[in-house]
Image: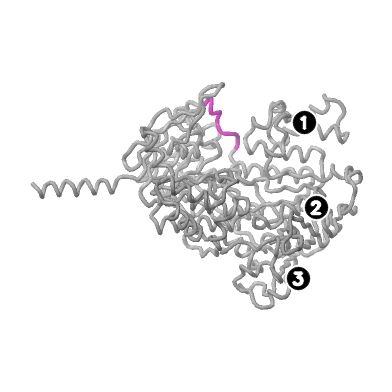
Amino acid sequence: MDELNDTIATVASAEKAQQPLLEVRDLRTYFYTDSGMVRAVDGVSFSVSAGEIVGIVGESGSGKSVTAMSIVRLIEGQAHIAGGEVLFRGRDVLKMGTEELRQLRGGDVAIVFQDPMSSLNPVLRIEQQLSEAMTVHGRSEADAARSAVFLLRSMGITAPEHAVTCYPHQFSGGMRQRVVIAMGLSNQPALLLADEPTTALDVTVQAQILELLKDLNRDYGTAVVLISHNLGVIAGVCSRVVVMYAGEIVEEGPTEEVLSNPRHPYTWALMNASPRVGAMRDHRLNSIEGMPPDPLNQPKGCRFAPRCPFRTPQCDEHPPLFQMQPGHTSRCWVARDGTKFVRRTAVASTMDDEEAKGASADPGTPLLQAENLVQHFPLRGHVFGRRSVVHAVDGVSLKIWPGEVLGLVGESGCGKSTLGSTLLRLLKPTSGRIMFDGHDITHALPSELRPLRRRMQMVFQNPYASLNPRMTIGRTLGEPLQFHGVTCGDAQTRERVKQLLDVVGLGPQVIDRYPHEFSGGQRQRVAIARAIALEPDFIVADEPISALDVNIQAQIINLMADLRERFKLTYLFISHDLAVVHHISDRIIVLHLGRIVEVASPGELFATPLHPYTRFLISAIPVPDVKIERERQRLVLAGEAASAIAPPSGCPFRTRCPIAKGICAEVEPPLVERQPGHFVACHFPGEF
């Protein structure tokens, strides 16, 4: 009898070990609005095993974040979990009481939100916030304080004893994200829900965060659900991927299998919309035409059918999830019938002789020129009796030729946006010289700049913050037209605005809508329409695709390329996404701590980078190919950038440079042309 009981116990233990850590069954989360019911999550089912990293991808509005919030029941207000089960270690989270949920959240299950600044209390020190996450789950204050320092050190934050005394605003974006991850892991959870943890971070910080997630998974066995719209991020981290569209799962399977052999047209389209370093640059990105379906009025058949190039009459019927092969499912009639969606291969591009010749040749008079431009911002208070300043831009010289797209890349805080604003004279430079089409505008008065404002425009990073929420799109676009005398009277202005909306692909029917009625990509189109309204010669595009999903990103890039050809525009394109900059730019400037460290054509820069900083940036670019991500030797840039308040002597990169020598601390390297059209500021170019 005892032997029988032991056998039963052994079998039960084995079954429990095989049970998924998290199992989501037919989850349905609806939002009840005045216009009707929105099925944000509509019958989602997936599982996560202990120690597994599962990725969830899809466009904005596909239901990714709502799924994560529903798992820990953070849905409130107009939202309601209408049905399904969320089983964590066999217990249904949807049936838990208040006390059980309190122990679950932050204990067994932790969540990392997309924006760390909004999830950290700005008036509390880091130590208080980390300790609170532990003391509410039974840890003593002394133990929590010790653990806070240990957690920050394990996250790779230098001087953690000092860091815990700081406030969130004193940290960079990457450091704040590390703090949020540390907070989530403070109670050693079994499951971490990471909602876009690397969105809007530059590539080097993104690489550090992803390496951190992999280390935590390996060292602590923490299971991770990673939500992202970046397929390269998913390829480098996740063993399995779930693809969502319009509130439901359309494909699921092993990451390598799904990305190399997509069995749903939507996955196939996302793969082809992603720009790649090394791909041909003389073609449009393959964006998905149209918009996702109206969540208030979903199609009765396949929800992707209206945008699908492979649709058939059978697609009018809603498809179930079909088993393509063991562990790989797809919600597609066409795939079920055997059609394969071959991913377009990227053809490597090299800088040929003509490109090299063009890069070194003088094409005439530059449209915009800066000479030794300096932009310093004084800080309140004094340090050691001296007034301290932020060296945002520290001696930049550049030329931008008519019709050129000049890319500007670098880490967050390197001075990219400040340089763009200063070139347009939105900021008055501390010193240096700015010439625009032969006019010296360095010290020009507002009255002298006003006639030139028509010719110089800017597309800001956050279109929602740069659009007046109380003005319709028609008024927003019409105001500068009337102010500069481009149109006369409301009727002519309204007609011109309709034409602008048609140019950027929105259509005249949206003219009376307000900014909050648009998606992120649509608002960015409005911002671009405002920039081109006065038919300018020069546009500074400051992170115009930051935080946009891959398809909207492709649409915006194609739009900017089309407008360049149509209106002969000149761009300064600022971005931390090097793959996008490679695709769209004629030349690229690499900026570090307010100084130019390398300039070259895209082909030359990515084929033979000469500055160690550039090599680190290129190495950190995620590639949506599991095989490449698995085999490549990525260079991870350790530590934080030097302070812009007290920059180091000599080369500003020497504190993180693996080949720095004595001369690097004594002499600042000049920007020298090492090859035709290829400039670098390094004492040992190409030696790393």
Is 191 positioned to the left or the right of 414 in the image? Answer: left
How many residues crowd around disc 3 within 10 Å: few (fewer than 14), some, or many (20 or more)?
A: some
**Cα–Cα span, label 1 and label 2:** 28 Å
Q: What element carries label 3?
A: loop
Vertical relation: 328 (above or below) 493? below
Mark 3 or mark 2, earlier in chain: 2
Amino acid type at circle 3 is Pro
Pair 1/2: label in front = 2
Residue 512 visible in the picture: yes
In the rendered image, which quarter is residue 523 located in? top right
Would you say residue 291 sits in the magenta stretch? yes
Is 261 positioned to the left or the right of 454 in the image? Answer: left
Is 487 positioned to the left or the right of 314 in the image? Answer: right
Mark 1 or mark 2, earlier in chain: 2
Frontmost residue, 238 versus 503: 238
**Cα–Cα span, label 3 and label 2:** 22 Å
Name of the residue lying farthest toward the bottom: 662
x and y, in percent, of residue 367 in the image: 84, 53
Residue 550 visible in the picture: no
* Mark linked to residue 375: none
Frontmost residue, 596 versus 642: 642
Amino acid type at circle 2 is Leu
Q: Residue at x 71, y 68 (%)?
A: 680
* Mark linked to residue 670: 3
Q: Which residues make up the magenta segment?
A: 289-298
x and y, in percent, of residue 655 in the image: 63, 69
Cβ atoms at labels 3 and 1 below 8 Å apart: no
Q: Name the residue under label 1.
A: 497
Q: Is mark 1 on a helix, strand or loop?
A: helix
Frontmost residue, 680 versus 280: 680
Q: How many marks?
A: 3
Q: Mark 2 points at which residue?
A: 423
